Image (cartoon, rainbow, N blue to C red):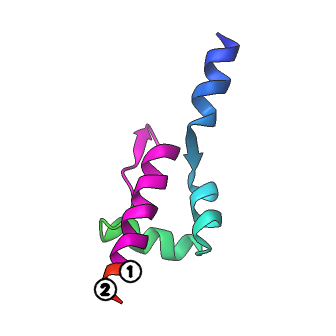
Amino acid sequence: MGIFMEKSQDKLMTVADVISAMGISRSTWQKLVSEGRTPPIVRIGAVQRIKRDTFDAWIGQHENAATNNS
């Protein structure tokens, strides 16, 4: 069971991981959450996690949108 948990956790990012990867502050993150402009959040009680593959795809979509708008 320990190995399964480690592999599952490797696929989930904390909010701190996400804001660090994006280079934004926690207050900016909260603003994005309130506006519904974040990757899908997995909520387990009060805990928020973001699937790493979903985050990567979400970032890719925004990169593509920025490139297409240039």
Residue 64 position within the rendered picture, expressed as x and y whole percent measured from the top left: 37, 71
Residue that appears at 32% across and 80% down: 68
Report the disc number at residue 38: none
CA separation in Å, label 1 and label 2: 5 Å
Whether 2 is drawn above or below 48: the answer is above
Quadrant in the rendering for residue 4:
top right
Q: Which residue is mark 2?
A: 69
Image quarter in which the N terminus is found: top right
Circle 1: residue type: Ala
Residue 13 appears in the rendering:
yes
Region in magenta: 39-66
In the foreground, 57 or 46: 57
Q: Secondary structure at mark 1?
A: helix
Residue that appears at 43% across and 62% down: 60
Circle 2: residue type: Asn
Q: Contact, CB < 8 Å: mark 1 with mark 2?
A: yes
Residue 61 position within the rendered picture, expressed as x and y whole percent measured from the top left: 36, 64
Report the disc number at residue 66: 1
Residue 41 position within the rendered picture, expressed as x and y whole percent measured from the top left: 40, 49
Residue 47 appears in the rendering:
no
> Does residue 45 belong to the magenta stretch?
yes
Number of numbered discs visible in the structure rendering? 2
Image quarter in which the C terminus is found: bottom left
Residue that appears at 53% across and 75% down: 27
In the foreground, 33 or 22: 22
> Does residue 65 belong to the magenta stretch?
yes
Q: Residue furthest bottom?
A: 70
